[in-house]
Amino acid sequence: MAVSNVRPSAPAGEEMCPYRLVLEHVTSRWGVLVLIHLLDRPHRFSELRRAIGRVSEKMLTQTLQTLERDGLVHRDAKPVIPPRVDYSLTGLGREAAEQVSALAGWTQERMDQVERARAAYDEAREPDSRAS
Amino acid sequence: MAVSNVRPSAPAGEEMCPYRLVLEHVTSRWGVLVLIHLLDRPHRFSELRRAIGRVSEKMLTQTLQTLERDGLVHRDAKPVIPPRVDYSLTGLGREAAEQVSALAGWTQERMDQVERARAAYDEAREPDSRAS
DNA sequence: CAGCATCCAATTTGATACTG
DNA sequence: CAGTATCAAATTGGATGCTG
């Protein structure tokens, strides 16, 4: 039944540059997080789940499958009982993950600038302060 | 009424590292495209709409407002009739846009690798070919 | 433990109509 | 043209229950 998109609203039936699709997989909410965590080290399914926090297993599975299909993530299922599956980055995936990780890092570094901007933005339209 | 999230499912009420939120704005479907196009040059509202293609004006507006609030996009509304509004990147926005753009570029360059990976992935589970 | 399938609620998205 | 408000449709996301 072919898992396909990780992020919403692919207007079903509409065409779209294929690269935008991959970009969306990579930048998808969970895709970003998965890549970042795998950049650190390989993770088992449940490790990833815990590391990311608040991901339904459904979404994590879907994200992993999409990234695997795109050749960014490697899935290593050991035929043991109980099952053990390790996920890691492929060479391609590492390249993507590094960029995504850099972007995430940048975001964290700039957070205070962003918050200042927000404060200014919000204040500018809530003419509710300066009484009298 | 406070415009806030550009990408779905912020489980309403649940807390989340603030930086992840900004990251999501930046990597959101339309956020990515807006940043990339503005990196090229400032655009008017409708120019952006056409440049991106298939964006409802509602989504574009929302995305722009979110990015503006985060201090990434600058909105310059000229008080003329008919209205003319130019959107451009702020210094902060340019930094973000450059990284996003790099990621997009990378994606395009690697598309064939991705497609090969997909082909392999798909073939591996559609034991429907090799008849005999 | 991993992960698939289904049902269902919560959200997002896009069309449309309307204002300045 | 730019932007807002509203409404219906389409998707996501998550909870469950069930395999191996």
Image (cartoon, coloured by chain):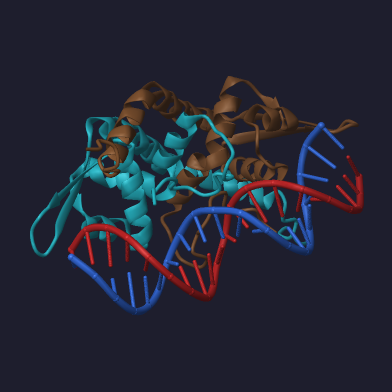
Chain colours: A brown, B cyan, C blue, D red
Task: Report how many numbered discs are placed on residues in the image.
Answer: 0
Residue at image location 56% in from the left, 24% down from the top: A39
> Is A65 on the left or on the right of B30, as rendered?
right
- Residue B34 percent location from the top left of the image: 31, 47
Residue most toward the left?
Answer: B80
- Residue A63 percent location from the top left of the image: 62, 43
> Is B89 on the left or on the right of A24, as rendered?
left
- Residue B30 percent location from the top left of the image: 38, 50
Residue B60 showing in the rendered view: yes
Q: Nearer the viewer, residue A20 or B43?
A: B43
Residue at image location 59% in from the left, 33% down from the top: A34
Residue most toward the front?
Answer: A132
Residue at image location 32% in from the left, 33% down from the top: A119
Q: Nearer the viewer, residue C9 or A46?
A: C9
Residue B55 showing in the rendered view: no
> Is B91 on the left or on the right of A111, as rendered?
left
Which quarter shows the C terminus of chain B? bottom right
- Residue B111 percent location from the top left of the image: 45, 44
Q: Nearer the viewer, residue A33 or A97?
A: A33
> Is B67 on the left or on the right of B21, as rendered?
left
* Image quarter of residue B81: bottom left
